Image (tube, helix red, strand yellow):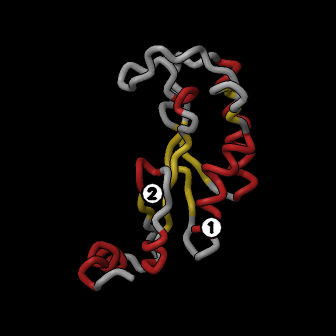
Amino acid sequence: MFEPSKNRLVEAIRAEDAERLIIADGLRWGTRPVPSLVSLGIAQSTRGYEPMQISHYKAAWFRSEGWPEPTWPLHLKEGEVYDKELLRKNRIQPWKALENKGSGVHVGEWGAYNRTPHSVALAWMKDCLDLWKEAGWGWAMWNFRG
């Protein structure tokens, strides 16, 4: 539970508009929910960039040099595969647990850099969209023009 001084921002927003939707980012760039915010009655925002080997392939601002060209499902170490079910486990289930405590969830941004092979980006995006639709979450795409 937050101390009253920690609620000041939410209280100030509610004083202006009691019905205003407030969305806070999750921790670690939106990858982890923050259960302690549930008591504030606000929603939380996750991201859709996992696995980074697909979303950030050859991105100049990200340390991606040396990554092999991605596939979807993504084959990692010998025998390890990152697929729709691993996305469900890593990116959906923790946020559904938060939602079950009363918090709304939104995918605040997602997308793939324009160097990711188009067919790979589309296959990965289809699985992400399927999972978010199944979860009942809205989303916002990063850099629509790519």
Residue 97: mark in rendering? 1
Please give left or right for residue 41 compared with residue 15 in the image. Answer: right
Q: Is residue 35 above or below residue 130?
A: below
Which residue bears the numbered disc 2?
A: 26
Indicate the amino acid at tag 2.
Answer: Gly
Please give left or right for residue 89 compared with residue 2 in the image. Answer: right
Crowd class of label 1 (few under 14; some 14 to 19; many from 20; radius 10 Å): few
- Assign the N terminus to one quadrant of the image: bottom left
Indicate the amino acid at tag 1.
Answer: Ala
| Res 124 → quadrant | top right
At x 55%, y 27%, the residue is 53
Q: Secondary structure at mark 2?
A: loop
Quick check: marks 1 and 2 in contact, CB under 8 Å? no
Distance Cα–Cα, label 1 vs label 2? 13 Å
The residue most toward the front is 78
Q: Is residue 47 above or below residue 71?
A: below
Q: Is residue 50 above or below residue 1?
A: above
Crowd class of label 2 (few under 14; some 14 to 19; many from 20; radius 10 Å): many
